[in-house]
Amino acid sequence: MQGNLTTPRAVPAASPGRESEGRAADLWARVALPAAAPEPPAEPVAAPGLRLALSLLEEGALTSRANRSCGSYAARAVPSAGAVYPYEFAVLVMENGVPTAFRVDADRRICARLAAGTRVTTALDASMLAIPENGGALVITLTRPWLSMRKYGDRGYLYTQIDAGHAAGNLLLAAAGRGAAGALRLRFPRETLSELLEAGENCREIYSATLIPANPAGEPSTRWTVHDDTDRERRGPTWRSWLESTCWDSLAGWTEHSASAALRTVAAPLARIRTGRRPAGGHSGLGDPSEWPELIGTRASSKAFTGEPVSASAVWQAVSALSTPLQTDLPDASPLSATLVLRSTTEPEQNAVYRLHTGERQPGPLPSTEEVARACMQQRALAGAAAILLLHVPRTSLAGAGSAAGTENLRELAFRCGALGQLLYLGANRATVGVTAIGGFDVPLWRTLAGLPEDEEILYALLLGRPDDSGIKFDRLATAHAQNER
């Protein structure tokens, strides 16, 4: 009962000085950090599958050759809301003939060996996954929602899923660009694999698994090292903010998506795109895969748009990339649809709203510059966009638990959005059109401007136009400008 003010005679009252000292000690205890455990000795990256996976991660997610003025940390092959990149990777490969799991620290270029042998085999069997033979790799994408939610609140969970979709989809494209088509799995049991990778206990969620067949192309940078981390007792205490734990606990129920029937992987477009226009160069979708590494390496997000009209044919060339087939286990039919608002082109007769899943052209009033600014949460740097692509679903498709068997869950819908967004980025790069994606927007206003039904929910918006990169990209700042935070 120490400190109980209802029994003042039971405990002598503390002097003001001692009380102040006690509060200061409590505060210091809260801000103090535990000592870091000694780091295990570094080893070279030897396993062929691990070398393959790291080189693919460098090309498809971690680095970019694009010229940017906002710092080398931002030079990534994929975009991210607020440049927070709320995901990580793990890699499962054969090392000296033994199945081995590694956690990837992309910032420090360290691979921590978590487990090897029977535990890995058991987790793979329970997850219905396998390591590709002869030096292939299984790349696991894990989301860390806290990184996005601490800036964007609950909506940051959606951004996390879409950002991971950009990265996972781009890994497939990077592999295909090397002539080795990979396959992405979203529908598999996760519990045992999550335990192996220590995901849940560290506030991570397994997002997807990408199977990469062995191929001779690509070598990781020499900065990568391997550390043995299989002995948990040697690691020492791991610091984690109580805020992240609280955030993770708030997601209970969110991360338990509706059950989805497992399907075999097939190569198919992630959305139905019917434009009636022949793609430039004679190639469907994104074009010749041998050109994809260059497109991936030079992708960039536009900071702003000048407001000048752009060529309608260039926009359509960019949009044609959405029909690129990707090897996934998603069903052929999906509730996700795409609508293109073409509002400012050098061919005014083509300005209209297009339902890309049907090819229908919808004439009528088009959004003004002021309306675009309002619909983009007053991100006025984007108001000069010449075209806007909206990815949307019927509200009933977001029902979650209790939905009909085979229905896509939020993770799967968000993957489609992220991977389609990445395809549009690369298509715009090929067509030399500026592009940027946003997750913060006024859904009812965009629904009105695009003539969408009242029961449609817009998940993602991507804007195209003539780029103006003279300023700064506001959403990379600490303030959540994308959500009109002031």
Image (cartoon, rainbow, N blue to C red):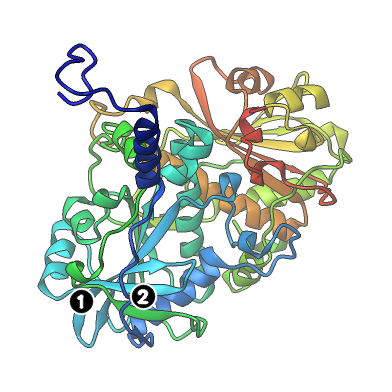
Q: Is residue 145 found left or right of 114 in the rendered image?
A: right
Q: Amino acid at mark 1?
A: Pro
In this rendering, the label closer to the viewer, 1 or 2: 1
Residue drawn at (23%, 54%), measured in percent from left and top? Answer: 194
Q: Residue 226 in the image: x percent, y percent?
A: 35, 80
Q: Quadrant of the C terminus?
A: top right
Q: Is residue 385 visible?
A: no
In this view, 268 is above or below 62: above
Q: Residue 201 in the image: x percent, y percent?
A: 24, 50
Q: Residue 414 in the image: x percent, y percent?
A: 45, 41
Q: Which residue is mark 2?
A: 213
Residue 54, quarter of picture? bottom left
Q: Residues within 10 Å of mark 2 (few under 14, many from 20)?
A: many
Looking at the rendered structure, which numbered label has been put on residue 99? 1
Q: Amino acid at mark 2?
A: Pro
Of the two numbered discs 1 and 2 on the same chain, state the one appearing first in sequence: 1
Residue drawn at (54%, 71%), measured in percent from left and top? Answer: 59
Q: Is residue 120 visible?
A: yes
Q: Is residue 430 found left or right of 121 in the rendered image?
A: right
- Separation of marks 1 and 2 at Cα, in angstroms: 15 Å
Q: Secondary structure at mark 1?
A: strand
In this view, 407 is above or below 134: above
